[in-house]
Amino acid sequence: MKKRLYAGDIAIVVCILAACIFAGLYFYMPSKDAADAFVAVTVDGTLYGTYSLNEQTDEWIADTGVRFIIEDGQARIAESDCPDGTCMSSGTVTASSPSGKSIVCLPNKVAVTKKTEVQTDGAESGVDAIVG
Amino acid sequence: MSDKRHSAKTAVICALLAVLGAVLGILEGMLPLNLVLPIPGVKLGLANLFIMCAFLMYGAPGAFAVSAARILLVFMFSGNVTAFLLSSAGGAASFIGLWVMMRFYGRRCTMIGISAVSSALHGVGQTAAALCLIGTPVLYYLPVLCGCCALTGVFTGALTNRIARRLPDMTSILAQNNH
């Protein structure tokens, strides 16, 4: 090798990081506290249920061994039988989280995603009305 | 060149690389990186190092063989189907990136840049597979995942550079480019 580091290397890494940073800044903007903020729980890609962030919930998701809790406006995965446990240290989803922020348990294929009424994707949610 | 490609020595060395990649992959999977960075799927990606070495020694077919063998070995040891599917998708995307970027090797960039691209694409491929299995929520992690993958890619790329320098006879593509 003539040189240890080429200009091309730096250019490539800078481009990738810049793209990631810009995408991150765009997607991770906290959203305004919305009274109608809720979380949609999906299992294996299909909607399992939606829960308002304003109510206390403590539920074991059927067939998966994942327990998710909503407490004081924060949703998180409290227990899981998955081998790595990333989901439990992924933090919480609150009303001020960016819309789309999710906590995912890969082995169990469970995702808890924050949404607001305005952002609901019609094709994805199979519910006609949100209770709560 | 064709003798070198099809000899028994080639097969043995590719097998060694595949096993090394698989074992290091399993070991690094035990590191609790999840506590430092709670991103599903983040890991050091040391296996990519061996795949890149395979590319330097035996070109695209060698790298593909090592990559496929490594993924299958890890699946055989872990038995985790989800991980296998995600790993295959990531490995495929990563290999394609490696293949394309190697054209620039020695002329515009070293393995550092190539590895960054390869690792980032691994993240993209993995997210694409997770998209099919789990749904759109995984897209949330894409920017962070790719950023981290690019950084670990720099690390493995630097290591590959050093290996390539120490083994000039084996890394024949290096010799072909007269570097």
Image: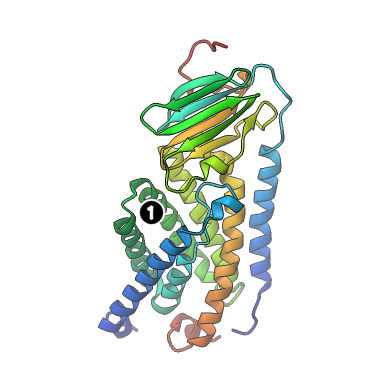
Disc 1: which residue = B88
In the image, B161: left or right of B11?
A: right
B41 shown above or below A78: below
Q: Nearer the viewer, residue B73 or B91?
A: B73
Q: Position of residue A129 (x, y in %)?
A: 52, 10
In the image, A60: left or right of A28?
A: left
Disc 1 residue type (three-letter): Ser
Q: Quadrant of the N terminus of chain A?
A: bottom right
Q: Nearer the viewer, residue B145 or B125?
A: B145
Q: Position of residue A116 (x, y in %)?
A: 62, 22
- Asked whether the viewer can see residue B42, the reply is yes
B132 shown above or below B76: above
Q: Nearer the viewer, residue B73 or A108?
A: A108
In the image, A56: left or right of B83?
A: right
Q: Nearer the viewer, residue B25 or B55?
A: B25
Q: Position of residue B96 (x, y in %)?
A: 45, 60
Q: Quadrant of the C terminus of chain A?
A: top right
- Asked whether the viewer can see residue B7, the reply is no
Q: Quadrant of residue A106?
A: top left
Q: Residue at x 59, y 68 (%)?
A: B155
The answer for which chain carries disc 1 is B
In the image, B1: left or right of B52?
A: left
Q: Quadrant of residue B158?
A: bottom right
Q: Residue at x 66, y 44 (%)?
A: A23
B71 shown above or below B18: above
B18 shown above or below A42: below
Element type at mark 1: helix
| Residue at the outermost bottom position | B169
Q: Position of residue B75 (x, y in %)?
A: 32, 56
Mark 1 crowd level (few <14, some 14–19, many ≥20, 10 Å Cα) = many
Q: Residue at x 54, y 69 (%)?
A: B156
